Image: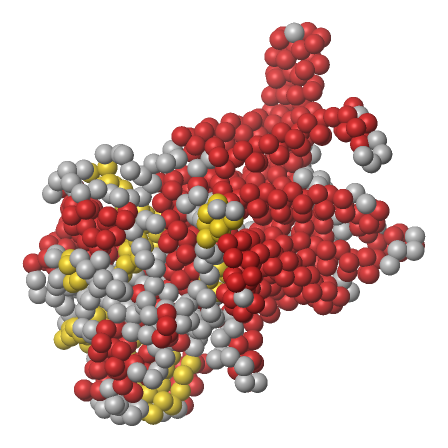
């Protein structure tokens, strides 16, 4: 046993964390046996997006660089995955070597190569992008991702390969994208379909493993000296430089890590959807992790997690109500607007404040019994109304002032 | 995909109770919904209604198209319920938009709504991309609006497996069927017409810049060659999908001085093309213009009096092209339902016939199977004859799952019998094509018949 594991696990500071994590782990493992097929795949998809958004947030919330092109990593990884499943695996003869476990090997190979290809893409694009900051950084990442969208949508790779005499002019298959089937696994006499839409338990459990490993790795990165430097860059790049940090190099490394983890998520996502379309590289797909992170709260490690869950389940909820579904873009936007306007640091900030409120309620209960809690509820409501009234009043005052100033300027007053 | 939320979150000073209460309410709703979701799992069979699920594009460029399919399906369901339902059970239908993630929408309709059978889809790309999802759901799924011949092409040996290579053209899926004539069939109709009426000509192409536009042109050329017509292909241009300005492409086609122009625009793109080509004088400078699936009442209604007369457009269905009582029943039912609705024409669109036929096909198959067991329905569907297809009785080919319903080609005219101000089709001709005929004509092109 390594040093002090027991002590550290059961130290009072860590106890709630350990208990919380254990409960979450048990829930995640039990989920597919309780939930039906649709809910299980929705949960799998959500977990994948959690990894994607958390990887994105390494750059955004921690380093202060807003990338608006992260879908390019999903695309790089996704097309690699599709190629592995469609062509590389059969060419390598994996079926002959591994027999019934073939698909698990293909899965692992796709995951690794997908991550690597996204990482390699990040090396090049990151180097060029970190030369810029703020809105220019967002614009250059957006431009690169749109360039990649055009390359896969027009199948430029296919045309180039054909020009040099390889293949018949198709590589990314243009606007139809690449779709594949993942068949049966036969492991120790246990036969199951790896990606089964009707009963996605197998793939879900793989997702949980990838999710746990990726989140743990990201958590360690964030809480390492490396992660601290990221935050220093976010807070004040000049001062970070004065401390001897090569901020550009550090941002570049963060970009690569973020890209590679986005690739991991991309490979899982594309296998879950059993295909990739050029639209997965379009800028709207890059907006997804941005929206998730912003609604979840970018300044907390678990913010993107809260955001991804809110996003996916909000979308699911809208699907249940035909009237909302008919105008789903509007209803989704409206519900998100409420979150952005009224939750400080997103949903995660809301959760945190709610917990603080509960603690306050508990202490009131200890002091004054139920009457104390009722009083707190009253105070909260009155406080809310007062704040709302205050906001309206100040808005009106500003408006009046502006109008008067305007009137004076055009010579009316 | 919502795109309006970028940048930083607003830092509202949040020490208010409002957000807490809001959060509570949201959490409560979420929990309730989750519980409801759990208890709803495993629906589908066992209920006393038969559920039909539909997924179409109901927003954006193809809205009119998807909406017209949904309308036709709803009319058919109402009619069936009036006649006593299916096996004495009421029929229920729910149609949803593709949304930003069509496979997820399809899963939701199959697994949450519990659809016994499904209809749908408005995009070939979405169809090919969703096919593995649909296959693993196992629910019978009938395409009513889909062009790509690949999805009904089972011959993976000759044409390559779509799912196992980047240039495969056979994507047959065991539980998917199609009631509309596909691109292979449509382009044959046009190629045949051109052969009979014009012979070898200077032909130019204009089509939307995605797989559909490219496929239509490839198939048209292959069929023309198979029919022994030695066209000279002088230009080929692809404006972007949903382009607002097609004049550069129209001009470059005009510069090539073609006799005939082949196009594959549909819905909003067809409207844009026709109005801008009219401005550029394209219709006066060429002998004829063809379009694969632009012949829809909504297109002609939007164009008003700008539609040029005498060009040839085709579709999967045109209301006046079939002289039979089933078509009349369809038109009557449709008119009755939508006569007072100002938002849609009171005649069915070009996807109407195939959608109506799909619903009646399901009725027949479920009654023959005696249950809503998906496998039983699928085996009934293979080789089924849809007796009251408005386009005349059609049969689902057992090997390919493609219906042999005809395609229709007609001439635009303001004399057409339509309930709106605008043009319609007259002198309609229908074309049928068998797999063996198609195979012979396409020989050497590498393209599959999909029939």
Asked if residue B238 is positioned above or below residue B29 in the image, the reply reads: below
Say which quarter of the image contains residue B128: bottom left
Residue A336 visible at all:
no
What is the x, y in percent for residue B358? 22, 55
Q: Position of residue A235 (x, y in %)?
A: 81, 48
Q: Residue at x 8, y 62 (%)?
A: B324
Q: Is residue B109 left or right of residue A339?
A: left
Depth order, front residue of A314/A18? A18
Tell me what residue is drawn at x 73 percent, y 58 percent.
A255
Q: Is residue B204 left or right of residue A1?
A: left
Q: How many marks?
A: 0
Q: Position of residue B173 (x, y in %)?
A: 34, 60
Above-or-below relation of B219 to A385: below
Which quadrant of the figure contains the C terminus of chain A? top right
Quadrant in which the N terminus of chain A appears: top right
Q: Position of residue B397 (x, y in %)?
A: 22, 64
What residue occupies the far right of the structure in this picture? A243
Q: Residue visible at 56% across and 72% down?
A: A151
Indicate the quadrant where residue B46 lies. Answer: top left
Looking at the image, can residue A167 be seen?
yes
The reply, left or right, for residue B88 in relation to residue A332 is left
Q: Nearer the viewer, residue A41 or A293?
A: A41
Residue at 59% across, 68% down = A148
- Colour basis: secondary structure
């Amino acid at each position: 046993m390594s040093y002090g594991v027991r002590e550290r696990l059961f130290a009072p500071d860590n106890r709630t964390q350990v208990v919380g994590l254990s409960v979450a782990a048990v829930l995640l493992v039990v989920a597919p046996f309780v939930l039906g097929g649709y809910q299980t795949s929705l949960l799998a998809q959500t977990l994948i997006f959690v990894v994607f958004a958390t990887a994105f947030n390494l750059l955004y919330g921690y380093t202060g660089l807003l990338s608006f092109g992260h879908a390019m990593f999903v695309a790089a990884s996704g097309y690699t995955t599709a190629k592995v499943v469609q062509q590389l695996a059969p060419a390598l003869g994996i079926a002959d070597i591994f027999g019934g476990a073939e698909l698990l090997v293909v899965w692992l190979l796709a995951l690794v190569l997908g991550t690597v290809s996204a990482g390699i893409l990040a090396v090049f694009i990151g180097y060029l992008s970190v030369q810029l900051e703020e809105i220019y950084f967002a614009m250059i990442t957006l431009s690169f991702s749109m360039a990649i969208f055009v390359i896969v949508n027009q199948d430029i790779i296919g045309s180039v390969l054909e020009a040099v005499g390889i293949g018949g002019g198709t590589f990314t298959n243009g606007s139809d994208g690449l779709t594949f089937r993942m068949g049966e696994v036969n492991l120790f006499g246990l036969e199951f379909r790896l990606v089964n839409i009707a009963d996605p338990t197998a793939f879900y459990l793989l997702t949980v493993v990838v999710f746990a490993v990726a989140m743990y790795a990201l958590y360690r990165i964030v809480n390492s000296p490396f992660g601290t430097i990221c935050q220093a860059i976010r807070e004040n790049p000049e001062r970070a430089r004065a401390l001897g940090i090569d901020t550009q190099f550090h941002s570049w490394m963060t970009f690569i890590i973020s890209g590679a983890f986005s690739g991991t998520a991309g490979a899982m996502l594309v296998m879950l959807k059993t295909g990739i379309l050029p639209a997965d590289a379009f800028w709207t797909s890059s907006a997804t992790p941005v929206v998730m992170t912003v609604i979840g709260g970018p300044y907390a490690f678990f913010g993107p997690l809260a955001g991804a869950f809110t996003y996916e389940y909000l979308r699911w909820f809208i699907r249940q109500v035909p009237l909302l579904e008919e105008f789903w873009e509007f209803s989704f936007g409206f519900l998100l607007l409420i979150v952005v306007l009224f939750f400080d640091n997103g949903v995660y900030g809301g959760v945190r404040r709610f917990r603080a409120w509960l603690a306050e309620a508990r202490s009131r209960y200890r002091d004054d019994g139920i009457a104390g809690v009722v009083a707190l509820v009253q105070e909260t409501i009155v406080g809310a109304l007062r704040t709302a009234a205050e906001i309206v009043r100040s808005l009106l005052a500003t408006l009046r002032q502006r109008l008067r100033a305007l009137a004076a300027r055009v010579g009316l007053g | 995909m919502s795109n309006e939320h970028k940048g930083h979150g607003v830092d509202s000073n949040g020490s208010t109770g409002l957000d807490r209460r809001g959060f509570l309410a949201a959490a409560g709703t979420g929990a309730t919904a989750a519980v409801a979701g759990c208890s709803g799992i495993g629906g589908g069979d066992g209920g006393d209604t038969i559920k039909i699920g539909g997924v179409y594009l109901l927003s954006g460029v193809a809205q009119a198209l998807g909406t017209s399919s949904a309308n036709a399906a709803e009319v058919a369901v109402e009619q069936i319920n009036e006649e006593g339902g299916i096996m004495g059970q009421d029929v229920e239908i729910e149609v949803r938009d593709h949304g930003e993630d069509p496979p997820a929408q399809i899963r939701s309709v199959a697994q949450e709504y519990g659809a016994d059978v499904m209809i749908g889809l408005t995009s070939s790309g979405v169809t090919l991309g969703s096919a593995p999802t649909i296959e693993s759901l196992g629910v019978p799924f009938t395409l009513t609006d889909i062009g790509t011949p690949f999805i009904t092409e089972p011959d993976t040996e000759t044409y390559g497996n779509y799912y196992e290579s980047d240039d495969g053209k056979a994507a047959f899926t065991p539980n998917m069927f199609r009631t509309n004539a596909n691109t292979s069939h449509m382009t044959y109709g046009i190629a045949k017409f051109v052969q009979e009426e014009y012979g070898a000509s200077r032909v130019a192409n204009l089509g939307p810049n995605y797989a559909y536009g490219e496929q239509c042109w490839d198939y048209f050329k292959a069929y023309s060659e198979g029919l022994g017509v030695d066209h000279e292909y002088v230009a080929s241009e692809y404006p972007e999908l949903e382009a607002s300005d097609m004049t550069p492409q129209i001009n470059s086609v005009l510069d090539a001085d073609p006799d005939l122009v082949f196009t594959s625009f549909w819905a909003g793109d067809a409207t844009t093309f026709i109005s801008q080509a009219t401005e550029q004088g394209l219709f006066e400078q060429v002998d004829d213009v063809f379009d694969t699936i632009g012949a829809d009442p909504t297109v002609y209604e939007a164009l008003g009096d700008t539609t040029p007369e005498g060009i040839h457009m085709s579709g999967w269905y045109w209301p006046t092209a079939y002289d039979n009582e089933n078509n009349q029943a369809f038109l009557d039912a449709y008119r009755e339902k939508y006569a007072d609705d100002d938002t849609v024409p009171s005649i069915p669109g070009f996807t109407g016939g195939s959608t109506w036929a799909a619903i009646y096909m399901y009725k027949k198959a479920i009654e023959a199977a005696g249950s809503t067991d998906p496998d039983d329905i699928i085996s009934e569907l293979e080789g089924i004859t849809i007796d009251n297809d408005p386009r005349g009785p059609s049969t689902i080919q057992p090997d390919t799952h493609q219906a042999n319903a005809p395609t229709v080609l007609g001439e635009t005219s303001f004399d057409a019998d339509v309930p709106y101000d605008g043009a319609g089709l007259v002198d309609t001709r229908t074309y049928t094509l068998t797999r063996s005929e198609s195979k012979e004509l396409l020989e050497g092109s590498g393209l599959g018949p999909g029939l």
